[in-house]
Amino acid sequence: MKLVYTVCTTNHLYQALSLGDSLKQTNPDYELVIGLVDKKPNTDFEIPFQIVEVEQIQPENFSAMESKYSVTELTMACKPLFALYFFNTYPTLEKLIYFDTDILMLNSIEVIEKSLDEYDIMFNPHITKAISLNETWNEKNVLNAGLYNTGFVGMRRSENTFEFLNWWKTHLFKYGYHDYCQGMGADQLCFNFVPVFFKKVLVDLNPAHNVAYWNFLERSIQYENGQYFINDDKNKPLTFYHFSGYHPNKPKLISKHFPNPLKNTVLKQLFTDYNTLLLKNHFSFFSNIIPAYGKYTPPKKEKGFLTQLIDKAAWKAINFIENY
């Protein structure tokens, strides 16, 4: 049995379905299971992937978690809960791979599978090279967000892995907030400790894995003969791209965290194809559903042009005063 899982709320199911479609196309021997931190919606169309609702796994202390965490924090805190559930539910499952819903699979994950023959836990760093502090997204941002990105976590069945998952679960029950001033970065910042606390951990440096805005300065994407590849190396086909912070309503922006317009022709095509897939997977239906659990905050209204100008002028004045 080969299993990939993701975790989301109903309003992000359009992303999960897109992940599943791309996984099925590139890795047909894998099955996607969606861990839903929500109530399963009624639809007049078929959802072709298994959905496991959080109520079904009956996590301990869930009511306490959902009463104190935002929807996003709660969803992230459930990642280890679903992993433990799947390992316990499927006794023959030896390897389990987690991907965030906003990931697009573009090639075989056989390399990941083989790595898990040797290692119990694997994940990617945000960056692998030094970045100038003058850049928009630099080393300071990485220190806030965490050295590693938890959009991908590979796991092999072992006592070591179960210790890791239980540690992660316990940590997120108490410290799963987005509060960088207090040293809490939801599910991610605590991962700084994982290579120190646990054995057989692979910090995966493969440049074809988990490409996203945060590593643009060290990775470039090319396209030729129907294949994306990395850093002009045709032996490095792009395995998966992470569309963190991307939104179909703003298709020309790379990410809300990195609001730069798309200029590169290859990236434009990749983003256009992904946007088409999201719309096909019922973005307009799912995106307006309010999650059943966690503290929900309605999206902020877009600032008008005049307000944006005032904000910009105010920040210029503040910077001038501080640096005078």
Image (spheres, rainbow, N blue to C red):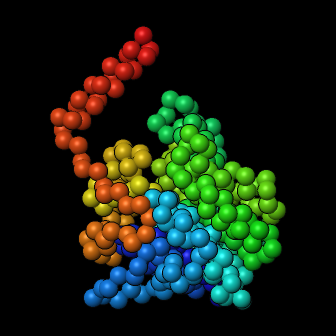
Q: Quadrant of residue 186?
A: bottom right
Residue 61, image x and y in percent?
59, 70
Q: Which quadrant, please, contains the N terminus?
A: bottom right
Residue shown at 71%/88% (left/top)? Answer: 91
Side of 266 relative to 191 (left or right): left
Residue 322, image x and y in percent?
43, 16
Residue 217, image x and y in percent?
52, 43
From the viewer's side, name the closer residue of 168 and 308.
Answer: 168
Residue shown at 73%/52% (left/top)? Answer: 193
Which residue reaches farthest top? Answer: 324
From the viewer's side, name the closer residue of 279 and 290.
Answer: 290
The reply to whether residue 312 is visible in this rendering is: yes
Residue shown at 62%/57% (left/top)? Answer: 174
Above or below: residue 3 compared with residue 251: below
The reply to whether residue 23 is visible in this rendering is: no
Total count of labels: 0
Q: Quadrant of residue 4?
A: bottom right
Side of 261 relative to 146 (left or right): left
Residue 296, image x and y in percent?
37, 61
Residue shown at 50%/29% (left/top)? Answer: 134
Q: Quadrant of residue 287?
A: bottom left
Q: Which quadrant, please, contains the C terminus?
A: top left
Above or below: residue 130 compared with residue 122: above
